[in-house]
């Protein structure tokens, strides 16, 4: 069997969480950046996969949904991970579950795990910490046991979340660079939605940008950023919901 890891991780938190989950699995692994997926991948029924995405506004980042058309699940077991920035993950796991099922996967475990908030990094700072890592590894071990023992298991029956899902709200948070931009072009090359024109790197297409903060995170000169007043306004809005420590949540099928 092979363990596929489908992930989208613009600022590294989701990838870190999926790496911790995978560290418990001693088997062949194939890492696939969902954001770059543009050709078909066929899983065998005896394979397993992890699908790890950040929660954006309590939903799956919408540009990822069509990417699932490239996955032929063929009844392979899937373990879902929604990584969130200490506010809430709302409908992310429900939507991820439905999307994975429509790709022919059987969802057999799901976790919502806290990591640093990629827009306001003071929230969820230091997460996942030692206790999160312990919980995540324990959950991963349970998923692995389920995978090896429940050969006819039908998967998860319920997950938190509403259907229809909450409206997907885009944020007016578009990073840009000032005069100090060196013009290396890394941000434009890596932007998952091609929102940065390669001939005008300091700008950003507001309609295309998904505010994922990847360009801010990978700018080698640290000059790409969000306007301070906009960040302050976002902080004021999120402060109440983000300040208290949130828990990880894990879901397994009834056996
Ligand atoms: C556009 C956007 C929307 C977000 N929405 C939420 C949210 O609804 N709830 C939450 O707790 N965190 C939210 N976050 C924080 C991310 O889910 C969190 O920081 C995650 O770890 C980012 O993953 P990454 O490090 O792999 O990029 C949001 C981040 C971004 C960029």
Image (cartoon, rainbow, N blue to C red):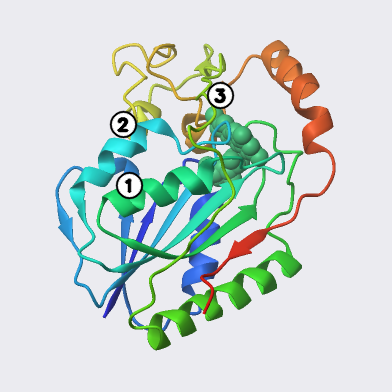
First in sequence, mark 2 or 1: give its number: 1
Mark 1: secondary structure: helix
For discs 3 and 2, the disc positioned in front in the rendered view: 2
First in sequence, mark 3 or 1: give its number: 1
> Which residue is farthest bottom?
149
Q: CA distance from mark 2 to mark 1?
A: 16 Å
Left or right of 205, for residue 167: right
User: Residue drawn at (49%, 47%), measured in percent from left and top?
Assistant: 94
User: Residue drawn at (73%, 46%), measured in percent from left and top?
Assistant: 124
Mark 3: secondary structure: loop
User: Residue drawn at (76%, 21%), measured in percent from left and top?
Assistant: 237
User: Residue drawn at (75%, 27%), measured in percent from left and top?
Assistant: 238
Left or right of 62, for residue 238: right
Give neighbour class at mark 1: few <14, some 14-19, many 20+ (Cα, 10 Å): many
Q: Which of the two residues, 191 or 77, is positioned nearer the viewer here?
A: 77
Left or right of 174, for residue 101: left
Instruction: Pick the quarter of the image with the N terminus.
Output: bottom left
Residue behind mark 2? 189
Label number found at residue 34: 1
Image location of residue 32, percent across then percent down: 30, 56
């Amino acid at each position: 069997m092979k363990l596929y890891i489908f992930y989208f991780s613009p600022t590294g938190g989701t990838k870190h969480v999926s790496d911790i989950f995978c560290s418990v699995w001693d088997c062949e692994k194939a890492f696939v950046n969902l954001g770059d997926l543009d050709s078909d991948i066929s899983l065998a029924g005896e394979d397993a996969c992890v699908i790890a995405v950040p929660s954006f506004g309590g939903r799956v980042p919408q540009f990822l949904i069509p990417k699932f058309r490239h996955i032929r699940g063929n009844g392979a077991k899937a373990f879902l991970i929604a990584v969130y920035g200490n506010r809430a993950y709302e409908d992310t796991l429900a939507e991820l579950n439905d999307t994975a099922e429509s790709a022919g996967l059987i969802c057999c475990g799901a976790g919502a795990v806290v990591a640093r908030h990629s827009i306001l990094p003071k929230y969820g700072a230091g997460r996942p910490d030692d206790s999160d890592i312990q919980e995540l590894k324990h959950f991963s071990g349970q998923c692995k046991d389920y995978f090896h023992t429940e050969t006819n298991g039908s998967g998860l029956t319920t997950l938190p979340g509403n259907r229809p899902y909450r409206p997907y709200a885009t944020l007016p948070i578009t990073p840009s660079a000032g005069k100090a931009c060196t013009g290396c072009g890394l941000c434009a090359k890596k932007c998952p939605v091609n929102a940065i024109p390669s001939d005008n790197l300091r700008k950003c297409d507001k309609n295309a940008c998904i505010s994922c903060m990847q360009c801010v995170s990978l700018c080698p000169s640290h000059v790409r950023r969000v306007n301070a007043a906009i960040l302050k306004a976002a902080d004021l809005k999120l402060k109440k919901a983000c300040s208290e420590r949130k828990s990880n949540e894990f879901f397994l099928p009834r056996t």
